[in-house]
Each structure stands twice: as structure tokens, then as C-alpha cells.
Image (cartoon, rainbow, N blue to C red):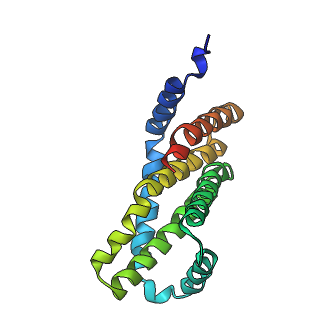
Amino acid sequence: MANKGLSFKKQLREAIDYIKESKEYIYFILFVFFLFSFIGFFFADKLTYLDAILAEILLRVEGLNWFEMIFFILQNNILAVFFGLFGGVVFGIFPISNAIGNGVVLGYVSNKVISAGSFFEMWRIFPHGVFELPEVFISLGLGLKLGAFWFSKNNKFKLFKENFWNSLRVFFYVVLPLL
């Protein structure tokens, strides 16, 4: 007989409930990300140092076939959301810096794509972010919440433990399937 306590439906429902409970943290990460996306877009002329970083990434994927490219992106995304989520334990610094950095890069790249072509060229980037961005925002928001335990006046260890296990549940039942 299957253990009802570990059923997929129950775990998924609890993960979704935890995401809903954590929406303020996720919304904050969204705000930071889009604020810095606008900064990256409108101050692209001051951020040309990003060209070298982006060129390095392009060199790493140059010549990959479609399977290798999918594996590269999947591996990169899994690591990014994992560290975004559990790196938050250090006062939530990593999720905020991740939202800032990725926002700036998205804004910068958007500026370059539009400058080189047209606004419609952005649609080539859009499919890449449809599932990726929600998983990133959820992970970074929960990472921020995980780091908030340091500022709690209540039982810090209990709060950390609850948030850690809930975050792990979200990682396996929501974030990984979105990848």
C-alpha cells in the first residue's frame, strides 16, 4: 500500500501552497529583476564590459549540436536555480545579487538585439524565457525567504528548517519540472 504522506499530489499541493505563501518575496525579486533590466537596457552604453562575458559564453556553446545545447542550457539552469534557492541562506544576498545581475544582462542584451535588428527580433529570445524566468523568480524568491530566518525574532532554527524543507519540495515538484 502506498504511503499517502508522500503522494505526488499532496507534495505538489504543499509546494504550490508554499509558493503562494511566499509571494511577497517572489514579487520583490521580480521588482529587482525588472528594475535592473530597465537599467541594463537604458544604460547599455555604460555596460560594454558585458560584451566580453557574453562572448565567453558564446565560445562555450559554439559548435554544440542541438542535444549538447539543450544539455548545456538544462545543466546551467539547474545549477542557477539550485544556488539561487539555497544560496539564499546567507542573508538572502545571493538571490538579490542574482536578480540584479541577470536583470542587467537581460536589459543589456535586449538593447543590443533591438539596436542590431528590430523590436521583433526579441521574439527569438522570448521562447527561451517562458518557462525559465518563472522558475528563476520562484527560486530566487524562496531563496530570499530562506535567508530571512536570520532576521526572525522567533525560533530561528525551526523557521530555517521549515523553509528549507518547503523550498526543497518546491525545487523537486515545481522548479525542476518547469525546466
Q: What residue sits 44% from the left and 52% below the top?
A: 134
Q: What residue sits 63% from the left and 58% below the top?
A: 75
Which residue is most to the right? 157
Considering only vertical position in the picture, is 113 above or below 84? below
Left or right? Give the position of 176 relative to 13.
Answer: right
Say which quadrant the N terminus sits in.
top right
Q: Nearer the viewer, residue 82 or 124?
A: 124
Q: What residue sits 49% from the left and 51% below the top?
A: 135
Q: Is residue 42 visible?
A: no
Considering only vertical position in the picture, is 115 above or below 84? below
Left or right? Give the position of 138 relative to 120.
Answer: right
Residue 45 position within the rendered picture, expressed as x and y whole percent measured from the top left: 45, 89
Residue 20 position within the rendered picture, expressed as x and y whole percent measured from the top left: 43, 37
Residue 100 position within the rendered picture, expressed as x and y whole percent measured from the top left: 52, 67
Which residue is most to the top? 1
Quadrant for residue 41, please give it: bottom left
Residue 157 position within the rendered picture, expressed as x and y whole percent measured from the top left: 71, 34
Q: Nearer the viewer, residue 171 or 39?
A: 171
Considering only vertical position in the picture, is 150 above or below 28? above
Q: What residue sits 52% from the left and 67% below the top?
A: 102
Q: Is residue 152 visible?
A: yes
Q: Count of labels shown?
A: 0
Considering only vertical position in the picture, is 74 above or below 10? below
